[in-house]
Image: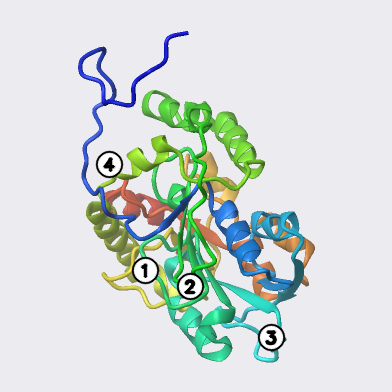
Amino acid sequence: MMGFSKNPPIGGYQGLELPFIDAIATQGMIKTNSARSAIKLVLSSAEARKIWLPTYTCNAVIEAANDVDVAIEFYKVNSSFDVDSELQLKAGEFILTVDYFGLSGEAVKRSRSRFGHKKMIIDCSQAYFAKPVDSLATIYSPRKFFGLPDGGLLYSKDPRIKQPSKRDESSESRMAHLISRLTNSPEKAYQQYIEAEQAISSLPVQGMSCLTERLLQSVDYQRARTTRARNALHLHERLGQYNKLNFEIDETVAPLCYPFLPNIDTSSKSALISQRIFIPTYWPEVLERVEEGSFEWDLVTNGLFLPCDQRYNEGDMDRLISLLAIN
């Protein structure tokens, strides 16, 4: 078989027209094939023996720690998302704190003051636009914010944590749901999306694929950030008085979604879905490790995580509000 030169090609068939909007957005980051891989990389590199995780977290984080044989303990958070006040770390122990929805950054900073930056991993999977806080590592999951087949980002100054030498080469197999979303309804490709998510869970720790990195370079980050901030503020101005969660929301924050924990009767999640308002649950597996009636239980059971991302405008937000049927 004839080999291929490494010289860039000239000519041939046309490819997708992807602009270079921001080729340096991830500069200085370690690029992995998933946020789960980034967590494994940090724990392995730091030779962690035990990690404290919030009970309110997804199983992917727990599985990442299990995969690298790190012992796990759980802690609770309060309604301000602060770590249990009685928790103290021992030698060799680390703590993972979460910037929930991109809106609990102040709680993360308070935790850093308590535990010190060398013991702390910050999970910004839901906070792509949050700046890294000095810590052992800050981890991001860009595919939660943009149409990507996979990928994770990791920021750390620790010299033990290094870029994986081998890139993932399987991204193309997880593009079907993204392409289908362009031409079909989200319902039609939902099973493909689930299969892609399941495939990511079994990936080994590798670098970000060339495909995902190129797609990231085509994202209009400034537009995405501005639109998310505007939509979240629009929702908060109209729903804040009915929300048990007391987040500070202004034009400077660009959250994953608008987390709404209503203190009044509203339309149910199933009623909203019947109107094609697709709302995730963060995270049903949490119910297996929390007490009924706890803050975490309330979030999983009654939280409405309203979309406010860059695909939508204020008219879409008004439709959301009207469908909540608040009297």
- Residue in front for this viewpoint, 297 or 110: 110
Q: Secondary structure at mark 2?
A: loop
Is 282 displayed left or right of 313 in the figure? right
Is 99 left or right of 286, judged from the image as shown? left
Q: Residues within 10 Å of mark 1 (few under 14, many from 20)?
A: many
- Give the spatial CA distance, label 2 vs label 4: 36 Å
Considering only order in the chain, which callout, 1 or 2, is on the residue closer to the N terminus? Answer: 1
Q: Which kind of residue does numbered mark 1 sit on?
A: His
Circle 4 Cα neighbour tier, 10 Å, few/some/many (<14 / 14–19 / ≥20) = some
Q: Residue under circle 3?
A: 89
Which residue matches tag 4? 218
**In the displayed structure image, the side of residue 262 where residue 222 appears, left or right:** left
The image's mark for residue 236 is: 1
First in residue order: circle 1 vs circle 3: 3
Q: Dots 2 and 1: beta carbons under 8 Å?
A: yes
Location of residue 200 by image quarter: top right
